[in-house]
Image: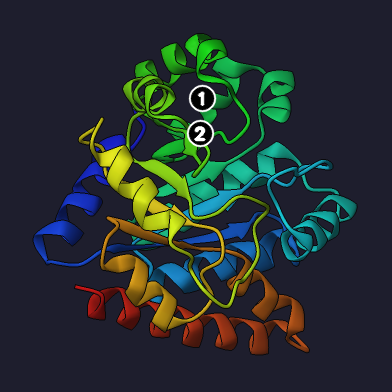
Amino acid sequence: MSGNIQLLNDTLAQARAEGRAALLAYLPAGFPTVDGGIAAVETVLESGADIVEVGLPHSDPVLDGPVIQTADDIALRGGLKIADVIRTVRQAHAATGKPVVVMSYWNPISRYGIERFATELADAGGAGCILPDLPVQESAAWREHADKQGLATIFVVAPSTKDERLKQITAAGSGFVYAASLMGVTGARDTVGTAAADLVRRTRAVTDLPVCVGIGVSVHEQAAEIAGFADGVIVGSALVKALLDAPDQAAGLAAIRALTAELAQGVRRGR
């Protein structure tokens, strides 16, 4: 066992002990380049993010909105390989000592080889994997290898998820539960919406796992609002957009450094 699920668990527990929500940042590997992506991941971790989710770009990202789709397309056209995703995890964790998880659709992992992917992710210091489109009833093979390697298996729940289904999903998961704040794809929103708080309440009724809320968070006021009722706040599209809008890499890193610091202040004001 070489994965870092315990580091992930400890990080979330430490945030709770400090009376705040954790800040989780999402960035796709290989964007704008492999090395540029590694620099971006390290920057958000050094600027206040507690945990980072490294996206494995996919040609059919059904959960992701246009901003992340654009970044994924840039990464894939740049020739990104799974080995580059693993290197991103390895270097980011080694540089910061913080937990790094991969967010991936199931098809690339299945094609790569379940045992191979789990072993390489754990050897790189990864803490787990978020699998938004892997049904729980089809996840036994992945969970077997993840457990063996010390990796968390993080499932996604949505406002439409019924209570009985929440029980099944959370019983099979580990690390934390990814709660989608609203129906639809990722992307910044002007408001958080009331469904998120209700989903967190219903999820906590069936599990002791931390519940982290994502989709739509872009400014510190939203981060503070979600931090008032969730264990973690997940921010992705706003960070990716800051990189997309920047004229060069230095400006992009400066932009995500400032945004991450602002969001980190937000999660601390939420309690």
Please report the residue visible at 48 percent of the width from the left and 65 percent of the height from the top.
193
Q: What is the crowding at mark 1: few (fewer than 14 residues within 10 Å), some, or many (at least 20)?
A: many
Give the residue type that dot 2 points to.
Answer: Leu
Residue 218 appears in view: yes
In the image: residue 8, left or right of residue 33: left
Q: Residue at x 43, y 49 (%)?
A: 100
| Element under disc 2 | helix
Read off the residue under disc 1: 118
Query: Furthest-right residue in view?
Result: 77
Residue 177 in which image quadrant: top left
Element at label 1: helix
| Residue 1 in view in this figure | no
| Residue drawn at (34%, 73%) of the image | 225
* Color theme of the render: rainbow
Q: Residues within 10 Å of mark 2 (few under 14, many from 20)?
A: many
Residue 104 vertical placement versus 226 (above, below): above
Residue 26 lies, in percent from the top left, at 54, 59
Mark drawn on residue 166 = none
Query: Is 23 on the left-hand or right-hand side of 90?
Result: left
Residue under label 2, please give it.
121
**148 and 35: which is toward the camera:** 148
